Amino acid sequence: MRGANVANAIPITKRCYMTEYTYSRKWSFPGCKPRDSFDASVAQGRFDGPGGSADHLIAVAAWDGEGVGVGIPQFVLEVTPGAGFVYAYLLDEWNRICHIYHFEKMGARMFLFNRVAYMYPDEPRHFHQFQATSIESIGFRANGCAKRKVTDKAAGVVDEVESGDVDVSGNWEPVPEFGEWGPLGKCRL
């Protein structure tokens, strides 16, 4: 509050809401809505059930407690049974997919093995992924090897770089118990 009279300052109150989750068989990104919704008990049965079938995939949409099911979710996860694989989608205020994180279960932890970032035209509206002007993809291995690919569609340029000395310590998360989705939906730059 540089230069402000602190005695006359108006306190700012930030409302804190508990994140709530909705579950479905699939998430419609263009429609920003679930397909074939079900309650948490059905979702947990699918999560705890046998793997190997797309029929057991669950889509998890995270909402702040003020607007469950209204507007744009904080993030959307696609989770296979037992969290063998988790795909996290972060959306912006125009419902554009900005980041996708791919996690794989490795022992008692989840490893972020791929991160994709999309840049869109500078217009305040929805765009689909194929309309992105630039796409950055980084593939990681647990041994510290990584490959970064940047596609600048506007300039028609693709740049690829490989490295064998990348710190991947921040790529690990605990395997989530059912309902503990927050760490997998956080922004990772």
Image: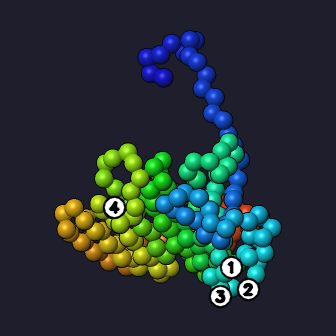
Q: Position of residue 103 (x, y in %)?
A: 55, 74
List the residue tagged with mark 3.
Answer: 52
Numbered label attached to residue 150: none
Q: Residues within 10 Å of mark 4 (few under 14, many from 20)?
A: many
Query: Gap between marks 2 and 1, in whole Å?
Result: 8 Å
Instruction: Tell me which numbered mark, 3 or 4, is placed earlier along the sequence.
Output: 3
- The residue at the point 76 percent across, 78 percent down is 48
The answer to whether marks 4 and 1 mark residues whose Cβ atoms lie closer than 8 Å is: no
Kindly indicate whether the residue at mark 2 contacts the one at mark 3 (C-beta within 8 angstroms): yes
- Residue drawn at 62 percent across, 66 percent down: 35
Instruction: Pinpoint residue 175: horizontal percent, then vertical percent.
Output: 67, 72
Q: Amino acid at mark 3?
A: Gly
Label 2: which secondary element: loop
Q: Say whether residue 11 is left or right of residue 161.
A: right
Contact flag, marks 2 and 1 (Cβ < 8 Å): yes
**Total numbered labels placed on residues in the image:** 4
Distance, label 3 to label 4, CA atoms, is 32 Å
Amino acid at dot 2: Pro
The furthest residue to the right: 41
Dot placed on the residue nearer the N-terminal end, 2 or 4 = 2
